[in-house]
Amino acid sequence: MSELLDAASRPVVVVTGMGVVTSLGAGKTDNWDKLTAGKSGIRAITRFTTENFKTRVAGTVDFVPVEPLSAPALAERMAEVAIEEALSESAIGSRGVFPGPLFLAVAPIEIEWPQRQELAQASGSNDAVSYDDLLRSAGTGQFRRFHERFLFGSVAYNLADKFGTQGSPISLSTACASGASSIQLGLEAIRRGEAEATLCVATDGSINPESLVRFSLLSALSTQNDPPESASKPFSKNRDGFVMAEGAGALVLESYAHARARGARILGVIEGCGELADSFHRTRSSPDGKPIIGCIRNAIADAGLEPEEIDYINAHGTGTPENDKMECLGVTSVFGEHAKRLAISSNKSMIGHTLSAAGAVEAIFSLLTLDRQRIPPTINYAVPDPTIALDVVPNVARDAAVRHAISNSFGFGGQNVSLVMGREPRA
Amino acid sequence: MADAPREVWITGIGIVSCLGEGPEAHWRGLNEPTPIVDVKTFAPYAVHPLCRVDFDKQIPKKGDQRQMEPWQRIGTYAAGLALDSAGAKGSGDLLGRMDMIVAAGGGERDWAADAAILSGLPKANDRERFLNERLMSDLRPTLFLAQLSNLLAGNISIVHGVTGSSRTFMGEEIAGVDAVRIALQRIRANQSDIALVGGAQNGERKDLLMLYDFGGFGLKGDFHPVWERAAAPGFALASMGAFLVLESRDHAEKREATPLAKLSQVVVASAARRAGTVEASLDRLWNTLGSPDSAALVSGATGTEPATSEECSFFKRHPQLAVRATGSHFGHGVEPQFIMNIAVATLAVHYGKLFAPFDSSGVEEPMTGPLAQAVVTNVGHWRGEGLALVERV
């Protein structure tokens, strides 16, 4: 029974269900087919007018109907779709009862412009509208629905109620590392013996004018709008920013003992997780790369592996000049000569940056890579960056022997999380 | 885990609110209850304003202060106080492996920019285009970072150098409970040795008052202590910051840190809110704590209904327990409230006595006896119930 515990005598944690929604579509099959065919989900934004914006493309999820549309409403609906797929695959629990806690990565929630306009209109103020007018409208009791919808915990509570998860649902944000943090929290809870199963979910549906402007003002977004599917160019010399996108990922994590006892199919193993925060700057990495290097090393050590045993890196790979340079520095520092042999590719070249959801969505694609022994490419790789001498799996998917994979997630606020995944429990 | 759970100590407290900054100011304020509440600035809403704070003392670079909105400055300041209190400030090696969990809301709006856009929108020929143009010209690039929930943690990393790990929980009151719970469980299970846990809120915000008053939860009109609000329920938002340093006993002893109290347990539940479910949930949690019947109760009651009445019914079935609601003193901090109340409970067991009642409804009664245990309660105004057991070392 030794394979039930890892080298550090902790429960081995496996994945028994996965569900995903991105701009490529809903479900693992559709997403995997398109990812490995090198297809892009990036398109011109039609949800609102962009004519005076520098960035006019995104990986919006327009095929999931939500009415009325708001970022938390779309995030919640996409999460439901992803969770339903994951639960159906895992066959864990019973209808409406999941036997463990929910860890939800979700973007910070706030009132949006349509609601502000509704409040302003209801206030009857014709000329200059002030916050006092909005407050007066809020206090009438006519807008109770906004309270629940725009609380920070609203998405998690609604999902917890719908799927019957146990205990207090946790809503978390570590910016663009949030999805990886949700898996990390689930992994830790099972290792502590607090839970036999956890539902780790990450979702982001926040493409609206203000979100786009916010990232645009930070000069973080690509402005290469034409054609949209070529905008996201991770690791290319002519990369100029990331492309915002929406999506959701859901994973059922389970102790191997629990999964085996109920005869569940093992989709992969979460072998380790590493974290290290950066104190250098709010949006930029420390120039020496030490936090990223430490983060990746922590993850490999937590998995009880050596760097040479990693065959594939699912890159954070946003396509910003800064990220890709620093990620390359981190990878070459950690892996040395082995960096030339391992493959590294960025799903974001095709699905864009799904922000709070990215860590979970990309962990799912990493697990599929391990399962299928096939690596999705980095598309739009026409002009190599000579300073990034890595095998980025340019433009075309390839079959490969992948024993262990790392998925990197780095975010504003100095957030760094790396996950190590494997195919099956080690004896 | 095969090993027995490790004992966890509270070795640092950093608190700032309307009562002042630091343990002494808070203990004094709690014992001489005179409400520091502003009923004019945001009338008809009552808020508890932050005391005067010299942010330079904990955030020396003006450039850092400029990158933050008030909630982040308050939190970064309180985090610095906690690190000072734990004797950890400036210890690079220790801070480099110190874990951090922050409970945060976020998103302070630029009221003037929002109001100008809302005033212009009805007159614009093309509203969508007008909104886009104004957002591009009126939003400050740095405002976004000052709004992001995880950027309080980010600022603490930058200003104080805490980098072992950085996680931010959201979700109103219960985010504070879960932040402490997860930090505690990680240390108990040997996943962490030392953690900084806390949160902050700027309650002097019209946009935040608005969010809560959609549901009618804002305290309006005259100020009354929490237990005396049945006729006009609601909470008075507070500006506050509260951080704790939690540490395994062996780690604290090795670096000769002084324990202020032991954090024995944090338990949480999420009852569907129907008549009686809050009380039943508190009953279950109380049993999980082992029914500590000689404890004092530091309550996070908000003054909203029906949550506060149900919490009160629970207390009435435990008449031997002395109860104090801190919301009457420094208001409702939402995410950091539970953490602030753990700090208050820590002071009480550290000093070995409870502070004075502040209530004429009969819920709070004098307690003069020695005190070795305190239970902190937290019933979210909308969802989530949590308890913590704090004990004298």
Image (cartoon, rainbow, N blue to C red):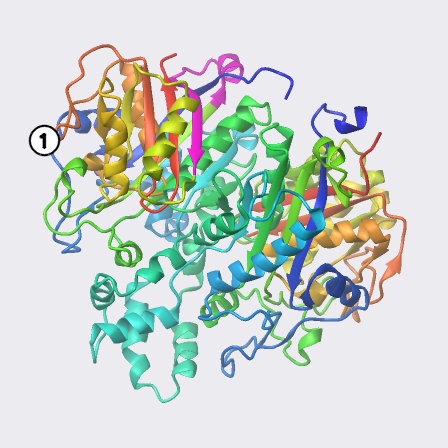
Q: Left or right: where does residue B26 sit relative to residue A186?
A: left
Residue A295 at what x, y percent from top left? 66, 40
Q: Relative to A74, is B134 above or below?
A: below
Q: Quadrant of the N terminus of chain A?
A: top right
Camera-side residue: B40 or A63? A63
Camera-side residue: B323 or A265? A265
Residue at mark 1: chain: B
**Magenta span contains residue B251:** yes
User: Which residue occupies the extreme bottom position in the image?
Assistant: B125
**Figure quadrant of residue A384:** bottom right
Label 1 SS:
loop
**Figure quadrant of residue B119:** bottom left
Residue B13 appears in the picture as rendered: yes
Query: What range is drawn magenta here?
Result: B247-269
Q: Left or right: where does residue B198 sit relative to residue A384?
A: left
Q: How many marks?
A: 1
Q: Relative to A362, is B226 above or below?
A: above
Camera-side residue: B111 or A292? B111
Q: Relative to B32, is B330 above or below?
A: below
Residue A89 at what x, y percent from top left? 71, 51
Residue B85 appears in the picture as rendered: no
**Magenta span contains residue B124:** no
Q: Left or right: where does residue A375 sit relative to residue B19?
A: right
Identity, as a three-letter code, of the amino acid under mark 1: Ser
Residue B205 at what x, y percent from top left? 27, 54
Q: Which residue is mark 1?
A: B360
Q: Quadrant of the C terminus of chain A?
A: top right
Q: Residues within 10 Å of mark 1 (few under 14, many from 20)?
A: few
Residue A183 at what x, y percent from top left? 63, 43
